[in-house]
Image (cartoon, rainbow, N blue to C red):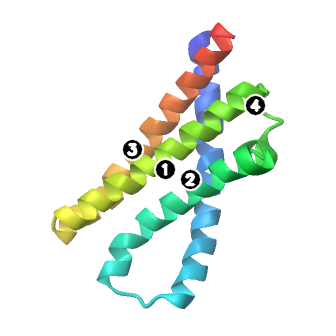
Amino acid sequence: MSVTRNWLHVSFGLFWRAFVLLQVSGLFFSLLVGKFLLAGSFYLLLRPTVFYGTLALVVVLADLGFKLNPLRALWGRRLNLSEAQWRTCTFSLASLLITMAIVNAVVAFTTPFDVWLDYKLVGKPALFIAGILATSWAVINKQRLG
């Protein structure tokens, strides 16, 4: 399989796995946190930042503390990646989530609400897709070099 085709295969595989992980954990997070916090504009702006930071912490702690990679545990058989490649995916996903949390906080608290909505609808998905493509590129390069 050529490098480009393998990269696209890994990119698509990581994209939908990370997307499902984000959606399911986001649903549970919203239900859990929504019960304890009142809905308001501050909560609306802060919720993605707290969610991404919490999910990054959970992903890293699961890998380092419990030796459990969430993406590999859920859907690891189909991609046939090595342990080192899955570890690269874990830390790349965590750094992507932290980046998204920081960018959300900066945009939410330094720009008007309309700009934050535009970022949430257009910028956040673009940042997520770019991060997944970069992660898969790092995984493929690790495979070629290693």
The residue at 34%/86% (across/down) is 40
Q: Residues within 10 Å of mark 2 (few under 14, many from 20)?
A: many
Task: Give the Cα distance between marks 1 and 2.
Answer: 6 Å
Q: Residues within 10 Å of mark 4 (few under 14, many from 20)?
A: few
Instruction: Write down the quadrant of residue 39 in the picture.
Output: bottom left
**Residue type, numbered disc 1:** Leu
Query: What label does residue 127 carry, if any?
Result: 3
Q: Do the residues labelled 1 and 2 touch (CB within 8 Å)?
A: yes
Query: What label does residue 26 carry, if any?
Result: none
Earlier in the chain: of badge 4 and badge 3, it is: 4
Task: Give the Cα distance between marks 3 and 2.
Answer: 16 Å
Q: How crowded is mark 3: few (under 14 residues within 10 Å), some or many (20 or more)?
A: some
Tell me where residue 86 appears, x and y as whole percent.
70, 33
Earlier in the chain: of badge 4 and badge 2, it is: 2
Q: Can residue 35 be seen in this view?
A: yes
Q: Which of 81 and 13 is in front in this view?
A: 81
Instruction: Say how many tags the image has.
Output: 4
Mark whose residue sits in front, 4 or 1: 1
Task: Say which residue label 4 marks.
Answer: 79
Earlier in the chain: of badge 3 and badge 1, it is: 1
Q: Are marks 3 and 2 in contact (CB under 8 Å)?
A: no
Q: In the image, 94: left or right of 41?
A: right
Task: Say which residue label 1 marks.
Answer: 97
- Secondary structure type for disc 2: helix
Tell me where residue 57 appears, x and y as whole percent.
58, 55
Task: Say which residue label 2 marks.
Answer: 56
- Secondary structure type for disc 1: helix
**Residue type, numbered disc 4:** Leu
The residue at 63%/73% (across/down) is 28
